[in-house]
Image: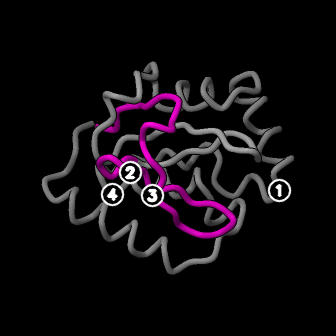
């Protein structure tokens, strides 16, 4: 699948809309946000495997374990069907994995910053802080 012709505008709209919604695990969280961004870029529905199937952190981790053996990186790799790349190769719209005190999360590359959705809402973090990236195209 390739990116649609107006993906930059569509990505900007998804990010803008995400900043106005409260964080809610299983409904508006880092994974669902990344899936919405990928859908805006390509039309692909990566959320179908997980959407609506977890409401708690424990439930999300259990689902990840069942899907790919318990590791976020392995789960994203399996879901997207491609190996992760070094973070320095990330381009706008690509998924990024980062880790903080609460665990591992997905973000979306916006250039030198990544849009990350968490308890505090949408934030921009340096791409350099991320662990790896997956190309979305």
Q: Position of residue 24 (x, y in %)?
A: 70, 68
Q: Does the magenta stretch include residue 126?
A: yes
Q: Distance between the residues labelled 3 and 1?
A: 20 Å
Q: Magenta region: which residues?
A: 109-137
Along the line of sight, the residue nearer the viewer: 62 or 124 = 124
Characterize the local packing of mark 4: few (<14), some (14-19) or many (20 or more) Cα atoms within 10 angstroms. Answer: many
Helix, strand, or loop for circle 4? helix
Characterize the local packing of mark 2: few (<14), some (14-19) or many (20 or more) Cα atoms within 10 angstroms. Answer: some
Along the line of sight, the residue nearer the viewer: 5 or 105 = 105
Along the line of sight, the residue nearer the viewer: 108 or 81 = 108
The residue mark sitting in front, 2 or 1, is 2
Give yes or no for contact between labels 1 and 4 (Cβ–Cβ under 8 Å): no
Residue at image x 62%, y 44%? 105
In the rendered image, the residue lying farthest to the bottom is: 20
Please tell me whether residue 13 is drawn above or below residue 89 in the rendered image: below
Quarter of the N terminus within the rendering: top left
Query: Circle 2 sits on which residue?
Result: 113
Query: Circle 3 sits on which residue?
Result: 36
Name the N-terminal-most of marks 2 and 1.
1
Q: Does the magenta stretch include residue 75?
A: no
Characterize the local packing of mark 1: few (<14), some (14-19) or many (20 or more) Cα atoms within 10 angstroms. Answer: few
Name the N-terminal-most of marks 2 and 3.
3
Give yes or no for contact between labels 4 and 2 (Cβ–Cβ under 8 Å): no
Name the N-terminal-most of marks 3 and 1.
3
The residue mark sitting in front, 2 or 3, is 2
Image mark for residue 40? 4
């Amino acid at each position: 699948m390739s990116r649609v012709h107006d993906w930059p505008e569509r990505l900007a709209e998804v990010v803008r809309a995400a900043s106005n919604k409260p964080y809610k695990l299983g409904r508006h969280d880092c994974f669902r946000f990344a899936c919405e961004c990928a859908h805006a870029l390509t039309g692909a529905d990566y959320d179908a495997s997980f959407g609506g199937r977890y409401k708690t952190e424990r439930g999300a981790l259990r689902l990840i374990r069942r899907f790919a053996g318990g590791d976020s990186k392995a789960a994203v790799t399996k879901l997207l069907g491609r190996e992760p790349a070094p973070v320095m190769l990330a381009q706008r719209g690509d998924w990024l994995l980062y880790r903080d005190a609460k665990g591992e999360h997905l973000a979306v590359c916006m250039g030198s910053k990544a849009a990350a959705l968490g308890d505090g809402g949408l934030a921009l973090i340096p791409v350099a802080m991320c662990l790896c990236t997956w190309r979305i195209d």
